[in-house]
Image (spheres, grey):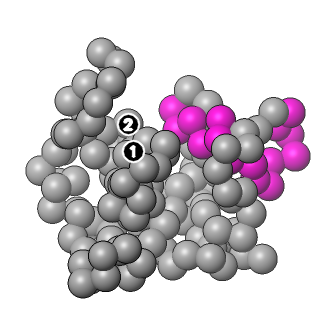
């Protein structure tokens, strides 16, 4: 899986030092399921998204306020940009507190049960991207 993710991290443009134009293409053959993506975003034991983000989840009593709201994510970022933010947000911001959900190497202070493996599978990431891409303002 690490090899798949390493191949997955293909950036179209690294000429801008801020990586503002960074993109990440989907792994071949994977398509996202927005319904499953919504469930993953809301699952605090799997994705942890709502620990930091708010979003269109009226059933959730508590959501975070450390990160931008997920509402309108599909209007702010392209599908490839959303994917890159999930796989390895340090490609966009070296100081981010967002976990690199698709990366397993070069990480610090990783809990034993998560060492050597990404937090989310490529399919999980595609499902979340499909959900977020539909959140338009």
Please name the predominant secondary structure of the magenta segment in the image: loop
Give the labeled residue for mark 1.
101
Give the camera-side residue of 76 and 41.
76
Which residue corresponds to mark 2? 119
**Percent position (x, y) of residue 36?**
58, 50
Near-viewer residue (124 or 53): 53
Whether tag 2 and tag 1 are in contact, CB under 8 A, the answer is: yes
Q: Kindly indicate the quadrant of the structure image that contains residue 92.
A: bottom left
> Is 108 situated above or below 137?
above
Find numbered disc 2 in the image and state the secondary structure of the residue it sits on.
loop
Work out whether residue 136 can be spotted: yes
Please give left or right for residue 105 compared with residue 36 in the image: left
Q: x, y percentage for residue 11? A: 25, 74
Give the structural element (helix, strand or loop) at label 1. loop
The first of marks 2 and 1 along the sequence is 1
Q: Residues within 10 Å of mark 1 (few under 14, many from 20)?
A: many
Q: Where is residue 19 shown, x and y percent of the image? A: 35, 74
Q: Residue at x 25, y 25 (%)?
A: 115
Residue 91 sits in quarter: bottom left
Residue range highlighted in magenta = 46-61
* Picture layout, residue 55 above or below residue 129: above
Q: How many marks?
A: 2
Instruction: Tell me, yes or no, whether the highlighted magenta stretch contains residue 90.
Output: no
Residue 121 percent coordinates (x, y) = 35, 44
132 sits left or right of 115 in the view: right
At x 76%, y 38%, the residue is: 63
Residue at point 74%, 44% (across, down): 65
């Amino acid at each position: 899986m690490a090899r798949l993710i390493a191949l997955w991290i293909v950036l179209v443009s690294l000429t801008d030092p801020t990586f503002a134009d960074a993109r990440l293409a989907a792994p071949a053959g994977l398509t996202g399921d927005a319904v499953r993506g919504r469930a993953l975003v809301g699952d605090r034991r799997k994705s942890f998204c709502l620990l930091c983000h708010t979003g269109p989840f009226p059933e959730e009593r508590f959501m975070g306020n450390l990160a931008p709201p997920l509402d309108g994510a599909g209007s702010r970022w392209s599908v490839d940009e959303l994917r890159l933010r999930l796989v390895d947000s340090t490609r966009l911001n070296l100081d981010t507190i967002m976990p690199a959900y698709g990366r397993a190497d070069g990480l610090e202070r990783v809990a034993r049960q998560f060492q050597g493996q990404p937090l989310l599978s490529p399919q999980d990431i595609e499902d979340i991207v499909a959900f977020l891409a539909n959140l338009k303002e």
